[in-house]
Amino acid sequence: MATPLRLQQGQLWKRGVEFIRIVRLERLAVAYKSAVSADFKAGTLHQATKKEFCRLIKSAVLQPSRPGRDTASTRPRAPGSAAPRRPAPVGPAPTPPA
């Protein structure tokens, strides 16, 4: 059985002569750009549900990621921006020592 792939923003797929790049990935929707060349200068933007998009790329081949290509998970934080905060613990507040 084939290993399932996870969709990620910035992935590049090739289907025949068409290249497909995931621009925005949401819970139930995918925005993708399709073009004839991998530089996407003359590409068109499309919207689809995840189900429709998965059917579209069923016959496509995932292309190796190019170095220097930003994806949502590897994009560095802006200088001076704080690290993500952790949620506050839930429960009773500790009592100070007497």
Image (spheres, grey):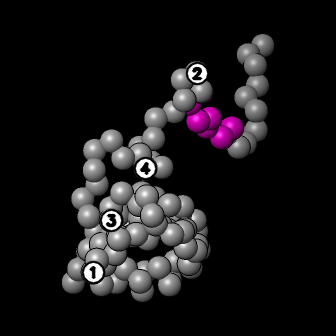
**Marks 2 and 1 in Cβ contact (< 8 Å):** no
The residue indicated by pointer 1 is 16
- Classed neighbour count for the residue bearing mark 2: other residues with Cα under 10 Å, few (<14), some (14–19), many (≥20): few
Q: Tell me the kind of residue under disc 2.
A: Gly
Which comes before the other along the chain, label 3 or label 4?
3
Give the extent of the magenta segment: 82-88
Task: Residue at 27%, 80% (x, y): give it.
Answer: 16
Quarter in which the C terminus is drawn:
top right
CB contact under 8 Å: marks 4 and 2: no
Name the one closer to the observer, 43 or 98: 43
Q: Position of residue 47 (x, y in %)?
A: 58, 74
* Mark 1 Cα-neighbour bin, 10 Å: few <14, some 14–19, many ≥20: few
Q: Are marks 4 and 1 in contact (CB under 8 Å)?
A: no
Kind of element beneath mark 2: loop
Give the residue pinned by disc 3.
Answer: 37
Q: Amino acid at mark 3?
A: Ser
- Majority secondary structure of the magenta segment? loop
Distance (Cα) linking label 2 and label 1:
44 Å
Whether residue 65 appears in magenta in the rendering, the answer is no
Residue of label 4:
71
**How busy is the neighbourhood of tag 4: few (under 14 within 10 Å), some, or many (20 plus)?**
some
| Quadrant in the rendering for residue 58 | bottom left
Mark nearest the camera among 3 and 2 is 3
Mark 2 highlights which residue? Answer: 80
Kindly indicate whether the residue at mark 4 contacts the one at mark 3 (C-beta within 8 angstroms). Answer: no
In the visual, does 28 lie left or right of 12?
Answer: right
Measured along the vertical axis of the image, is residue 19 above or below residue 54?
above
